[in-house]
Image (spheres, helix red, strand yellow):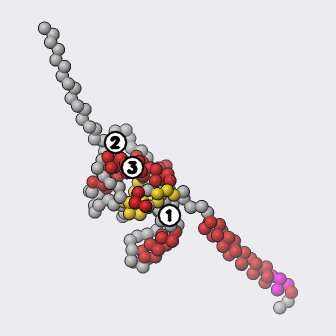
């Protein structure tokens, strides 16, 4: 092989290999990026601290309305998500997003026990109230999956719930009739 040809061959080789090396570098840096700031919520599950604070407020209010918000899944590690995604791909598990693509990996999604249908009291409570705490549904086929998205979850209008239904207002007790003897 002539010297110029060899030189061009080397240049070509460097051009081909450099992007691969760069991509590898980016991957390593991504993997080392700090994860979400997680705190524990009940049941040993973990969530992003902002989502957790909002969830605890929501759960407390739900409890006072007679509803328990039980978590089945909250934050998931990349590895856990990969495991679920692979099961889904093999047709052996429920729908799962690609690892890194799920808001469960960011600690912003929570799966709740909502009963078997959309008529269940727990689901009805969530549908009517979750938006006030920044939570909303994002997956049409998963009524149990709620995400903390405060910026894109509008608060209800005054006097309405999250579905636009008028709030039930406790009837005011009838004023006591004060009888005065005028005579
Ligand atoms: Zn989910």
Q: Which residues are magenta?
A: 4-8
Element on which disc 2 rests? loop
Q: Which residue does the image show at 38% across and 63% down from the upper left?
A: 72
State which tag comes first along the sequence, 2 or 3: 3
Is residue 119 visible in this depiction of the protein?
yes
Q: Which quarter of the picture shows residue 112?
A: bottom left
Q: Which residue is mark 1?
A: 105
Q: Nearer the viewer, mark 2 or mark 3?
A: 3
State which tag comes first along the sequence, 1 or 3: 3
State which tag comes first along the sequence, 2 or 1: 1
Looking at the image, which residue sits at the far left?
A: 183
The Cα atoms of the two marked residues, 2 and 3, are separated by: 17 Å
**Dominant SS type (magenta):** helix
The Cα atoms of the two marked residues, 2 and 1, are separated by: 33 Å
Q: Which quarter of the picture shows residue 173?
A: top left
Q: Is residue 68 magenta?
A: no
Could you tell me if the residues under marks 2 and 1 are in contact, i.e. CB atoms within 8 Å?
Answer: no
Q: Position of residue 33 (x, y in %)?
A: 61, 63
The image's mark for residue 160 is 2
In this picture, residue 156 sits left or right of residue 35: left
In this picture, residue 147 sits left or right of residue 32: left
The image's mark for residue 58 is 3
| Ligand 1 lies under 8 Å from the Cβ of mark 3 | no
Q: Nearer the viewer, residue 11 or 130?
A: 130
Q: Which residue does the image show at 35% across and 47% down from the upper left?
A: 61
Element on which disc 3 rests? helix
Residue 140 sits above or below residue 64 on the image? below
* Mark 3 burial class by Cα count in 10 Å: few <14, some 14-19, many 20+: many
Element on which disc 1 rests? loop
Q: Is residue 7 magenta?
A: yes
């Amino acid at each position: 092989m002539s010297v110029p040809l060899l030189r061009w061959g080397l240049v070509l080789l460097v051009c081909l290999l450099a992007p691969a090396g760069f991509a590898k570098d980016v991957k390593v840096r991504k993997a080392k990026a700090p994860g979400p700031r997680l705190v524990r919520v009940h049941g040993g599950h973990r969530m992003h601290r902002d989502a957790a604070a909002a969830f605890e407020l929501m759960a407390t209010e739900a409890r006072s309305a007679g509803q328990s918000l039980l978590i089945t899944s909250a934050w998931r590690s990349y590895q856990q998500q990969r495991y679920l995604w692979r099961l889904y791909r093999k047709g052996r598990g429920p729908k799962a997003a690609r690892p890194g693509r799920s808001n469960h990996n960011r600690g912003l999604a929570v799966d709740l026990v909502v009963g078997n249908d959309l008529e269940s009291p727990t689901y009805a409570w969530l549908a009517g109230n979750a938006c006030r705490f920044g939570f909303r549904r994002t997956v049409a086929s998963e009524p149990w999956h709620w995400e903390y998205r405060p910026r894109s979850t509008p608060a209800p209008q005054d006097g309405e719930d999250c579905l636009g239904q008028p709030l039930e207002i406790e009837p005011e007790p009838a004023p006591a009739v004060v009888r005065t003897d005028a005579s």
